[in-house]
Image (cartoon, rainbow, N blue to C red):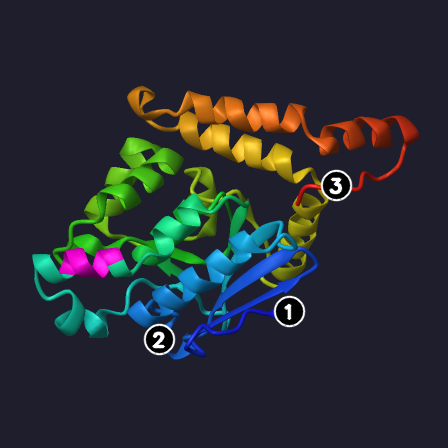
Amino acid sequence: MKKVEGLGTDKVLAHVEDGIGWLQFNNAEKHNAMSLEMSEASVTALEAFAADDEVRVVVLQGLGGKAFVSGADISEFDKTRANAAQDKQYTQRAGIHTTVKNLPKPTIAMIQGYCMGGGLALAAGCDLRFCTPDSTFAIPAARLSIAYRQDFLRWVMDLVGPSCAKDILYSARRFKGAEALSMGLVNRVIEADQIQAETIAYGKTLADNAPLSILASKTVIDELRKDPADRDLEKCQRVATACADSEDFKEGRKAFMEKRKPVWRVK
């Protein structure tokens, strides 16, 4: 196991093990409410994962078993988000969501317990979401007179559609894993005593696959989700060309013919 150092807080832990970069939120006494300090530390860890060839997939996890992320740390709001100007500055500094969304490697939110507000947006910004049956989801913006960020709302709406998004935002109600699965918010519902092992197994599956192929898939899917005028089709072509011209493509063909596990050169 290789730890990521220099995070500046013990409320965020990060390490690399078996090709998986683990970003763990360690603020259990506040149900892993996300402080500005935690967000900034998380960005540092995610940037380290992006630059580390050993990391092939990133898993986000809330420690303590009771919460993934229960939202932003509201106790900071009087100092950091008391008005529109402060809110804009806060959004610029609290960059974890955008960093996760733009990470060039696959991301998985492993959800146990509360996943609410900005925590739900963080999960929605990941590529995949696994949760336990008793995980609790909600966006309580309507109970705080907060306008949910436009980008957050887009990510949620992309997963569940406009009708379910309106239900979640208008009602501010809480719902569990089975309903989250039925509306498309999560990919899998896994029992609490199995979710860690199954997430690791899935992460290792991704780590064993061709990194250039996964990058190409992620890039093209993300571009196609954008409005047509905003799509970078040249970028899509570049990642496809990189696959076709790579040594890994040759290795994949050779390994298939030789009935062996491929050894990827490009991490």
Q: Secondary structure at mark 1?
A: strand
Asked if disc 1 and disc 3 are in contact, CB closer than 8 Å, the reply is: no
Tell me where residue 17 sits by quadrant: bottom right
Q: Residue at x 52, y 48 (%)?
A: 107
Tell me where residue 84 appears, x and y as whole percent: 9, 57
Q: Which mark is residue 2?
A: 1
Span of residues in magenta: 87-92
The mark lying in front, picked from 2 and 1, is 1
Q: Is residue 175 visible?
A: no
Image position of 125 with respect to 230: above or below: below
Tell me the element at label 2: helix
Q: Earlier in the sequence, mark 1 or mark 3?
A: 1
**Amino acid on which disc 1 is placed:** Lys
What amino acid is found at the position of numbered circle 3 in the picture? Trp
Q: Is residue 47 magenta?
A: no
The local secondary structure at tag 3 comes to loop
Task: Specify the label residue 30 is tagged with.
Answer: 2
Graded by Cα atoms within 10 Å as few (under 14), some (14 to 19) or many (20 or more), the crowding at tag 1 reads few
Could you tell me residue 66's position as x and y percent?
Answer: 45, 69
* Vertical relation: 168 (above or below) 9: above
Which one is in front, 207 or 122?
207
Does residue 75 appear left or right of residue 158 in this picture? left
In space, the residues marked 1 and 3 are separated at their CA atoms by 21 Å
Q: Main secondary structure of the magenta part?
A: helix
Q: Which residue is mark 3?
A: 264
Q: Earlier in the sequence, mark 3 or mark 2?
A: 2
The three-letter amino acid code for the residue at tag 2 is: Lys
Q: Residue at x 52, y 42 (%)?
A: 187
Q: What is the number of the mark on residue 183? A: none
Residue 26 position within the rendered picture, expressed as x and y whole percent measured from the top left: 45, 74
